[in-house]
Image (cartoon, rainbow, N blue to C red):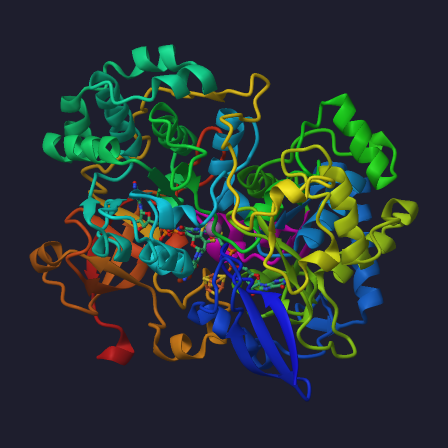
């Protein structure tokens, strides 16, 4: 029996697992003992990775759609040249920006780096990622506040903190292994605090739950800041030595009085004051946020308001502290520094001549080949298709027909495309319905590459199973198209994922995310290595769980963190007489993953999970409308769409709120085309809706 250690490719924890293989089959999966993230423990999704042996069709070939709508199976070579020719043809006919791509945070670092090189550098096309739906807000917030997209925490901080404050985060469901770290916390008198309009599973397990009004976080955070200032609960030394613009911030929050805060958030004055005292009495206060913050119309400023609280109280860079953004997908962190969206692998500015020169030198291409501007954002790509400006789209490892906000706009777009390449492990996903080309690639258990987790830890994905005759990886599929495009020497040095990793290492030299001290081999059977890990400084970084900002230095030119703030805006999509209820959306259960293409891998969950879209409703509201458990309602959204849901009745949502798990396509039929001003992340979590009771479905009569 062979043992192969690899990385789970679901959530951002990147748990490591030991796969035992006999006769070409995984016979046992054991969470890696001693691995600093998950030390011998993991969730049901990781334990189920072996199911891909059965759920992913072996030896599939690419498919090209024929004029009559049916598919023709072709060789990989034909698939590559078909896509390459079509991309070139469209660019010649309609211009370079008439083709686009949408990538993901769930591939290996090498795969999306190569995708960026082919699509953004060589073709000068726009390529965004599904990370726009997820982490874009945190990225912008970090860049503006810290000078670089560098979340500073290490998971150990959850064990060392005496005030663990979750804002718009539900780790009990979404990051169970992270929640396990909270349970390991032995600090005397530590408190778990949850700020979430919904009584989430995490709120149920917390010491304090603040069920504020949806989208009122920014107001609450400014009110808290005002109170901390008024009571002089500040770390003056830290503020003076390590931050800028505090004076202005102090003036700015003055009008955010307790009265105003209480009125706008729906919390009582006493609750807000209690929260202020909890922060002040903590010696090691840590703030953790996820999608309840990132997915809003003023999300960047909300994330920064959390950062401001950590800065003004000196809760950053020290054990058990920080303003910590929890990442979603397994390699979202990798995609942020090394992907098609960045293209300047290792970070940096498109316009910085020294950086351009360096990247061109490492990649061995002329500077003119490098992308010249940031990509069009996801929403601009979809709008571009619907406006007839973009004619070709290549998506990989994401299912936007389901996950994109106001998803009928994607359905409409898909029908307009002359070339629509879908690259996935399953051809049954909703996005594949209208594709013109399908590239079937192998799943994670047959791939190699590098992942970066939420605490900046690189780890190795290594092939657990051998590949069949026609089976290729995402890396090879992208490389195949690159070659067919005639990239020639521009692909020198990109031959294998390991070659690509070495290019990425060089690109990262002297950047905050420097990984020059990490080798491909060192990651194998390892405990993972957090960035930064520069060559020559291995000794000083040998600690296995490291955090950033311990010296109070940030990545801005002055090395000081910035207080960034802006007036609270009026909600552009408030509840109204016509749409009096608010549809909140999020993760439904530990075993369900996003658009559920992979839920079939998690056998127990697939067996028991509800097959039809459902939502949660408060008992009083249900009672008033004569609605019982499992009755159906038709929900009408402010975006003009409607969809039918089963109702589950629970006290855990408020009277005005409905909560729909995202795992059903109906959910995003109703979400609006509303984005954060700076990050362009969709505002997924608060859609005004109304509903009507629906007669029972035929089969249920
Ligand atoms: N099982 C499972 N785990 C997952 C995933 C999955 O699909 N399934 N997906 C992964 C990914 S990519 C991500 S990004 C993460 C997401 O992880 P989380 O962000 O933790 O999960 P969500 O359920 O999207 O949202 C978190 C909470 O935000 C709250 N919220 C909504 N509106 C507001 C508001 O106005 N203010 C505040 N304070 N809170 C609000 C919701 O009620 C919800 O409880 O999960 C990851 N883990
Ligand atoms: N309403 C609402 N909508 C949301 C959210 C929300 O909170 N509320 N959250 C948003 C967030 S945070 C996220 S991250 C997105 C997620 O949205 P998506 O990225 O669209 O969701 P997934 O189901 O994870 O899609 C991943 C796809 O990759 C495929 N796949 C798996 N492994 C491989 C592989 O190795 N190679 C290839 N090529 N394909 C593979 C899977 O079969 C699946 O089709 O959803 C967003 N949508
Ligand atoms: S917690 Fe995340 S990384 Fe760990 S096994 Fe579960 S899904 Fe995989
Ligand atoms: Mo995400």
**Is 401 included in the stretch rendered in magenta?**
yes
- Give the x, y percent position of residue 15: 52, 62
- Give the magenta range: 392-421
**Image quarter of residue 606:** bottom left
Q: Which residue appears at 61% of the width and 47% of the height?
A: 542
- Horizontally, is 209 left or right of 112 in the view? left
Whole-percent x and y of residue 383?
55, 39
Looking at the picture, tell me which residue is in the foreground, 392 or 379.
379
Q: Residue furthest bottom?
A: 23
Q: Residue 126: which quarter of the image? A: top right
The quadrant of the rendering that contains the C terminus is: bottom left
Q: Is residue 524 left or right of residue 597?
A: right
In the picture, measured across the screen, residue 305 lies left or right of residue 495, that is left
The answer to whether any part of residue 529 appears in the image is yes
Q: Is residue 113 above or below residue 367?
A: below
Q: Residue furthest front?
A: 539
Residue at image coords 67%, 58%: 523
Q: Image quadrant for the N terminus?
A: bottom right
Q: Position of residue 222 (x, y in %)?
A: 28, 24
Q: Is residue 642 visible?
A: no
Q: Is residue 280 magenta?
A: no
Q: Position of residue 46 (x, y in %)?
A: 50, 69
Q: Residue at x 26, y 28 (%)?
A: 219
């Amino acid at each position: 029996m062979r043992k192969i250690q690899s990385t789970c490719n679901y959530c951002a924890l990147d748990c490591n697992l030991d796969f035992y293989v006999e006769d070409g089959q995984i016979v046992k999966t054991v969470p890696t003992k001693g691995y600093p993230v998950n030390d011998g423990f993991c969730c049901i999704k990781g334990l189920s990775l072996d199911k891909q042996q059965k759920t992913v069709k072996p030896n599939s070939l690419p498919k090209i759609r024929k004029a009559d709508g049916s598919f023709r199976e072709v060789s990989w070579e034909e698939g590559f040249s078909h896509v390459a020719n079509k991309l070139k043809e469209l660019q010649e006919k309609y211009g370079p920006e008439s083709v686009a791509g949408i990538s993901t945070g769930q591939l290996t670092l090498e795969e999306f780096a190569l995708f960026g090189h082919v699509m953004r550098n060589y073709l000068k096309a726009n390529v965004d990622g599904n990370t726009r739906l997820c982490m874009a807000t945190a990225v912008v917030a970090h860049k503006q506040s810290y000078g670089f997209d560098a979340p500073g925490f290490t998971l150990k901080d959850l064990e060392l903190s005496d005030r663990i404050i979750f804002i718009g985060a539900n780790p009990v469901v979404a990051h169970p292994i992270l929640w396990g770290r909270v349970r390991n916390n032995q600090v005397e008198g530590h408190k778990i605090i949850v700020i979430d309009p919904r009584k989430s599973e995490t709120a149920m397990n917390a010491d304090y739950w603040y069920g504020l009004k949806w989208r009122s976080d920014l107001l609450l955070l400014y009110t808290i800041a005002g109170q901390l200032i008024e009571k002089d609960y500040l770390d003056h030394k830290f503020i003076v030595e390590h931050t800028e613009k505090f004076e202005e911030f102090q003036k700015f929050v003055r009008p955010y009085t307790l009265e105003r805060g209480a009125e706008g958030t729906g919390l009582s004055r006493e609750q807000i004051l209690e929260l202020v005292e909890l922060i002040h009495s903590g010696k090691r206060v840590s703030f953790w946020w996820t999608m309840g913050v990132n997915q809003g119309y003023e999300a960047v400023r909300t994330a920064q308001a959390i950062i401001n609280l950590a800065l003004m109280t000196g809760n950053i860079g020290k054990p058990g502290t920080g303003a910590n953004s929890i990442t979603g997908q397994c390699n979202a962190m990798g995609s942020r520094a090394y992907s098609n969206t960045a293209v300047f692998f290792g970070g940096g500015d498109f316009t910085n001549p020294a950086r351009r020169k360096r990247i061109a030198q490492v990649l061995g291409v002329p500077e003119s080949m490098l992308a010249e501007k940031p990509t069009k954002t996801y929403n601009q790509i979809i709008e571009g298709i619907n406006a007839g400006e973009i004619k070709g789209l290549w998506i990989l490892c994401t299912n936007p027909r389901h996950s994109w906000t106001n998803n009928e706009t994607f359905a409409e777009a898909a029908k307009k495309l002359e070339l629509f390449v879908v690259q996935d492990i399953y051809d049954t996903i909703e996005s594949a319905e209208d594709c013109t080309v399908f590239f079937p690639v192998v799943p994670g258990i047959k791939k190699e590459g590098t992942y970066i987790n939420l605490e900046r830890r690189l780890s190795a994905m290594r092939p657990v199973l051998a590949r069949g005759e026609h089976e290729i990886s995402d890396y090879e599929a992208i490389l195949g198209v690159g070659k067919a495009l005639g990239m020639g020497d521009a692909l020198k040095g990109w031959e294998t994922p390991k070659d690509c990793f070495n290019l990425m290492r060089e690109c990262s030299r002297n950047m905050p995310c420097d990984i020059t001290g990490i080798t491909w081999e060192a990651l194998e059977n390892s405990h993972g290595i957090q960035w930064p890990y520069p060559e020559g400084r291995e000794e000083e970084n040998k600690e296995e769980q490291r955090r950033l900002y311990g010296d109070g230095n940030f990545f801005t030119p002055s090395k000081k963190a910035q207080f960034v703030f802006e007036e609270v805006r009026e909600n552009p999509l408030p509840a109204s007489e016509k749409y009096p209820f608010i549809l909140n959306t999020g993760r439904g259960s530990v075993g369900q993953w996003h658009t559920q293409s992979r839920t079939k891998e998690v056998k127990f969950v697939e067996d028991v999970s509800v097959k039809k879209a459902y939502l949660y409703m408060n008992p009083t509201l249900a009672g008033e409308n004569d609605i019982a458990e499992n009755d159906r309602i038709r929900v009408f959204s402010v975006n003009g769409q409607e969809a039918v849901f089963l109702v589950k009745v629970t006290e855990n949502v408020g009277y005005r709120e409905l909560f729909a798990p995202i795992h059903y396509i109906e959910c995003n039929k109703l979400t609006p085309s509303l984005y954060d001003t700076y990050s362009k992340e969709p505002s997924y979590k608060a859609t005004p809706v109304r509903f009507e009771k629906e007669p029972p479905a035929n089969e249920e009569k």
